[in-house]
Amino acid sequence: MPANDYEFDLYRLNIRDDSSLFASNNNRIRSDESIKQILSAASTHEFDHERRERTRRYIWFFRDYVESSSSTARGDALYLVFGRSTPEHIGKILTDDGVAEGVSTSFPPPAIDSVIVFDLKRHLVAVQHNSEMMLSKTWLKSFHQILAKASHNLGYTSTLTIEPVPSNHDILRAFHSFDKLTQLKVHLLIPNPDITRPIKRLFEELRTGGIRDYVQDMKNPNGLNKAEGELPHASASMAQAGYKRGDVTMRGVIDGESVKKVTGNRPASAIVPEVKDYVRGMRDIAKTKEGKEITTKILAVIDTIETNERDSDEM
């Protein structure tokens, strides 16, 4: 991949409400302005998240909150830098007398980072891929902890989370691969602005019922109805769009064999050619024609991924 390409993984921005009986409805996150407020606050050092491991102390952080519009009517995007610094390392250190075990400190500490783009119109999130930073799920836990801390500090009884928009139609491919699907287990979160035809009826039922968080474990030894418009297909489609929490588990029969599939946590990915340097400098160019054109390019690629994923609903 050329050095100046912006490579990203695609996630869905979800809102998770506090389940406490005493949480005020007046303080729920329900608007894009609230989302902007939280992300802007999270990008200050006040909400940095410290994490200690066996030989290192890490600081996870957000910085450089920037708002940018596209050069079309497509919508706005927010840019943030998310990363990890290493102020302390325990191990072999060099002293005047030789090499000894000790603590090495650095100031300013070295850091690795990723530029995150939030698509406000569709509540989709492009996370620049950084293999060094994303070796484990620690980055995602820290990401969520910072957002939760900022949300609660601002008085909200909700927080923001991101969930993978599964790649290659993973969930629906698994769903359709069963000759007989006997179990579908999924934790759904009510969609925000992005409603597709296969999930519209389920969305309306959830909204009418006042349901925002829905755990399903559907079972039938004779096989679930997989037809479009029925609950199993609508649930799988909603999870495919990223409106979920965690994995999706399916059991059933394929070619006469009993099969279990767990899927949904590998995000779709894409590349926007020759824009990485511009994305990293977005703070300086966000309001310019050039900055708006870069935003338009990124949002267009996000739309391409989502269009491909939506096509899987017709499988």
Image: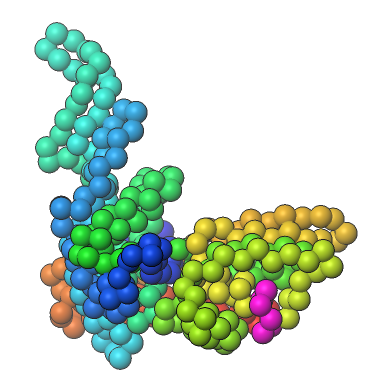
Q: Where is residue 78 shown, x and y percent of the image? A: 26, 72
Q: Give the range drawn in magenta.
A: 228-233
Tell me which residue sits at (35%, 60%) in the image. Answer: 128
Horizontally, residue 276 falls left or right of residue 286, namely right
Q: Quadrant of the N terminus?
A: bottom left
Q: Quadrant of the C terminus?
A: bottom right
Q: For residue 199, what is the image quadrant?
A: bottom right
Instruction: Using the rendered image of the protein, determine whether residue 103 is visible from the camera's viewpoint.
Output: yes
Tell me which residue sits at (32%, 66%) in the image. Answer: 23
Horizontally, residue 247 falls left or right of residue 249, namely left
Q: Where is residue 210 shown, x and y percent of the image? A: 47, 79
Which residue is at the front of the view, 273 or 46? 46
- Residue that lies at the very extreme toward the bottom in this rendered image: 73
Residue 35 in magenta stretch: no
Q: Where is residue 272 shown, x and y percent of the image? A: 37, 70
Tell me which residue sits at (16%, 30%) in the image. Answer: 105
